[in-house]
Image (cartoon, rainbow, N blue to C red):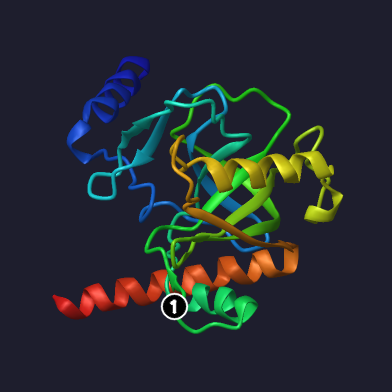
Amino acid sequence: MGEETERRKTKLYMNYKNTHKAHPWHGIDPGTPDEVRAFIEIVPTDTVKYEVDKATGYLQVDRPQKFSNIVPSLYGFLPRTYCAEKMAELTNKALARFDVEGDGDPLDICVLTEKDVTHGDIIVRARPIGGLRLLDHNQADDKIIAVLMNDAIYGEMTDIEQLPTRIVRRLIHYFTTYKDIPGEHTSRMRFVSIYGADVARDVIARSMEDYQNLIAEEDNKE
């Protein structure tokens, strides 16, 4: 009986043709706006910026970190989200404009934790507590700020107002400078405002709706 069980286990493990890796953008349950599942691409110790290749779902090298810009948190995106019309409506409303578009990417997220996470390509559970409203040229490029669930330091926080001011300033500084090129006098990223947990949940819900609209459009093309 024991040998038969082991043979079945071995057969199951070796049945590699029926195994697959879920696509980080399309194949992972994102959770809810109250408690999300984030896919982490890069961590503070990375000296290379990694980014998911949308076609394959694997991490690829986006660019080396040529200058002293260190991401101040775990950084990635929310699966099954997309920044388009619904999400950009909030930025247009905040700026009293009508021409801002979404950046056409999954919604970015920063996850704060006191732990030293050594690599990306992982999924974490997190609670959104706010966000940074940013413009990349003329496109909405929000960064959701979240805390790792059950984290010893950040885990009990529920709104960005509870974060130390220096942490918020560090995040703003990073995301308003990380695309700048030394020697140039123009800044690509523009900081608009900070928002709290309620708005963050709205941004997430809208980006989820934008994703569903994107998938529906793609299905209609077939």
Q: Is the residue 199 above or below the residue 38 in the image?
A: below
Q: Is mark 1 on a helix, strand or loop?
A: helix
Q: How crowded is mark 1: few (under 14 residues within 10 Å), some or many (20 or more)?
A: many
Residue placed at 82% from the left, 46% from the top? 163
User: Residue 149 appears at what percent x and percent y?
Assistant: 71, 43
Quadrant of the image for the N terminus? Answer: top left
Report x, y in % for residue 200: 66, 64
Q: Which of 109 and 155 is in front in this view?
A: 109
For the point 39% across and 58% down, the residue is 105
Kindly identify the amino acid type of the residue bearing the numbered disc 1: Glu
Q: As drawn, is 149 to the left or to the right of 186?
A: right
Left or right of residue 222, residue 212 in this image: right
Quadrant including the C terminus: bottom left
Identify the residue position indicated by label 1 in the image. 85
**Numbered-mark total:** 1
Q: Which of 106 and 101 is in front in this view?
A: 101
Q: Which residue is drawn at 37% across and 77% down?
A: 213
The residue under the point 24% across, 44% down is 56
Q: In which quarter of the image is residue 102?
A: bottom left
Q: Is 17 on the left-hand or right-hand side of 178?
A: left
Q: Is residue 213 above or below residue 14?
A: below
